[in-house]
Image (cartoon, helix red, strand yellow):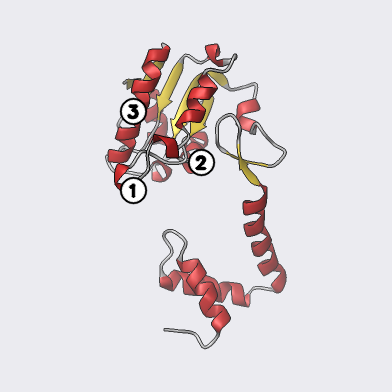
Amino acid sequence: MRYTSVSIEALVDEFAKLPGVGRKTAQRLAMHVLHEPRAEAEKLAGALLDVKDKVIHCSVCQNVTDLGIDPCPVCTSRGRDRSVICVVESPVDMLAFEKTGYYKGLYHVLHGVISPLDGIGPDDIKVRELLLRLSEPESPEVREIVLALNPNVEGETTALYLSKLLKPLGLLVTKIARGIPVGAELEFIDEATLSRAMEGRSAV
C-alpha cells in the first residue's frame, strides 16, 4: 500500500532501511510519529542528529563515546582490571558483557569482523588500533587478551587471525567458552550464559 502523503511515504521508506525493520513495522512507526506532538518529533530528530554529530570512537578502546569524553568512562575507570582486554565485534556486544556484571576488565571494539566474501579484511576493522594500544608504555600491564567474538565463520576467522598476531607478543590469548550456541549473536544471549562463557574461557 502506498500512502497519499508523499511525506509519510518518505518516512516509511527511511524507517524500512533500518536493520530488522520490515515494511509493516516501518508503517507503524511512521504513524506513531505522525500522531505524536511536534515536540516529541523534534526530540527524535535531535537525537538522530546528535548521534551523527556528537558520538566518536574512544581513542583507546574504540567503543562509542561522546565528544569531550575521551578516553571513555570504562577506559578511565580505576576499578577496572587493566591486565585483561576483552576483544568484541561491536559496542552492542560490549554492552552485553557489561550487563552481566561479571567481567571487570577492559575492552577493545573491532567494529566488524574479517569477512572475505564481503570484502572486509583486517585493515577494515580496528586491528591496527589494538596492536598500537598494546605497544603503548602502559601496555606491560596487559597479560591476557580474551577473544569474545560471535561463534560463526567470520568470528572464528577473526579470532584465528588475532591469535596469530598476539601470541608472539607473549600474551595469554583466550576465547570465551562455548556455552553459546554456534551461529548465535552475543547481543541476544542472556547474562547468565555470557557470565559462564567468560568464566570458562580457554587458551587459543
Near-viewer residue (176 or 144): 144
Near-viewer residue (135 or 197): 135
Q: Residues within 10 Å of mark 1 (few under 14, many from 20)?
A: few
Disc 2 to disc 3: CB gap under 8 Å = no
- Give the mark count: 3
Q: Residues within 10 Å of mark 3 (few under 14, many from 20)?
A: some
Q: Nearer the viewer, mark 1 or mark 2?
A: 1
Amino acid carrying mark 3 in the image: Tyr
Rendering coords of residue 152 (x, y %):
29, 40
Cα–Cα span, label 2 and label 3: 21 Å
Residue 48 versus residue 7 in the image, above or below: above
Q: Which mark is residue 118?
A: 1
Q: Which mark is residue 91?
A: 2
Rendering coords of residue 61 (x, y %):
55, 31
Cα–Cα span, label 1 and label 2: 21 Å
Amino acid carrying mark 2 in the image: Pro
Q: Which mark is residue 161?
A: 3
Give the side of residue 131 with respect to residue 148, left or right.
right
